[in-house]
Amino acid sequence: MKSTICDMLGIEFPLVAFTHCRDVVVEVSKAGGMGVLGAAGLRPDQLETELAWIDDHIDGKPYGVDLIVPTSFASKGEEVDQEAQVAQVPEAHKAFVHGLMASHGIDTSDLTDDRLTSGTRLGDNMRDSGANALLDVAFAHPIGLIANALGTPPTYMLERGKRAGVAVAALVGAREHAIKQVEAGVDILVVAGGEAGGHCGEVSTLVLVPEVAEAIRPYGDTPILAAGGIVTGRQMAACMAMGADGAWTGSVWLTTTEAETSPVVKEKMLAASSRQTIRSKARTGKYSRQLRSAWTDAWESEDAPAPLPMPLQSIVTEPAMAKITKLAEGGHAGARALASYFVGQGVGLMNDSVSARTVVYEFMQDFLSASERLNAFMDD
C-alpha cells in the first residue's frame, strides 16, 4: 500500500498489532502488518527470552516493542524498593480488595504484603533505571519500532531510537498532547480515542483523529496511527479517510486463537456487547478501559476507596486479579463473576475466535471493500 507508515516501518499493510503474546507478534508481521510486543510488565531477562524467540520465528519481518514510561507517577525519580511501595498502599485499599473477594467465596489469606511485593513490575519498569534496562534489551534485537504508551517519551528513548534508526511512537489521547509529542521529536503518533482498551483518554476516535491531524499540520508530516475501537478494516479505512496513515490495534487480538488471554475472559469478550466495558482508574491508577464485571462494578460503588496514583493501584489490584483469573479458569463461580481484562468498545464486533493471520487478511479485504464503496459514491 501507498502509506507513510508502510515506508517507515517496512511493512506491506499499515496495520500495527499491540499484544502481550509473542505468537501474535510473529503472525501479524508475517502476514504483512507489524506486531508490537507489550513489555511493560516484563523483567529484562523475560524480555530477552521473548525477543529471542520472536527473532527465531519471524523470518526477518519487522516488529516492535511497547513500554510504559509515564512523565509522572508516585515516587518517579526515586529509588524505591517494592517493600517500600507496598507500605504506601493504605490498609483501606487492601481491606476493600479482601472483602470483595471474600464476598465472592475467595480465600484471601495468601494475599499478604509479601505477595503484593512480588505482584507487579510496573513500578520498577516505569522508572528511568527500569526503562533503560528494558531498552538495552530491546535495542539489542532487530526491532523496527519502540513505543511509549503513556506521555512523551523521555529524551534518552528518543535519542536511542534516532541513533539506532528505529522509529519512536507515542500514544496520545488529546490534541495538546499530540503537539507536545511532535515538538519533542516523536516519529509516529498513535492517536487513541476513548473507545480504546487499556489506558485511554475521553475523546472519541472519530473526533480525535481529524483534530490531531489538523493540529500537527504546521509541524511537518508526522504520520498518525489511529487507535481506539478499531477491529475491522472498514473502521481503519474510515480513520485513514480522516487523516490517519494506518491503524494501531490491540483488543481485536485478545480473542485470536494464539492469544494469551485467559479462556474465561476470552469467552466473556466474545459474548460481550460494546456497552459492556468501562473506563476507570480502578485498575492502574490512570483511566483505562476494561471489560465490565462484578470487580469493576464494586470499584465504582460509593463504598470503594478512591484509586491510588500509578503504580500503587496496580500493586493492590494485579495480584488479586491474577488469583481471580486462575480460580476462574478452574471453574470457581465467584471468580468468574469478578474476572475482567483490558478491552475496548470494539469488543462488540469481536464475535469469533480466529487466527491472528486470518484477522490481518480480513482487515485487508474489509479495507478494500470499504475503499471500493467510497469510490462508488464518486461520479464517473
Image: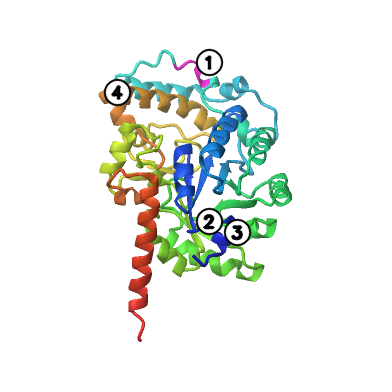
> Which numbered marker is on residue 104?
4
Across and down, in percent, residue 64 comes to 57, 46
Residue bounds of the magenta highlight: 111-116
Mark 4 residue crowding within 10 angstroms, few (<14) / some (14–19) / many (20+) = some
Residue 27 appears in the rendering: yes
Left or right of residue 104: residue 152: right
Q: Residues within 10 Å of mark 2 (few under 14, many from 20)?
A: many
Task: Indicate the secondary structure of the residue bearing disc 1.
Answer: helix
Give the mark toward the camera: 3 or 1.
3
Judging by the rendered image, the residue that carries numbered circle 3 is 8
Tell me which residue sits at (60%, 52%) in the image.
Answer: 169
- Among numbered discs 3 and 1, the one appearing first in the sequence: 3
Q: Which mark is residue 158?
A: none
Q: Earlier in the sequence, mark 2 or mark 4?
A: 2
Quick one: SS at disc 2? loop
**Res 261 → quadrant:** top left
Residue at the image point whose x is 64% and y is 23% from the top: 81
Report which residue position mark 2 lands on: 11
Residue 177 seen in the current view: no
- Residue farthest to the bottom? 380
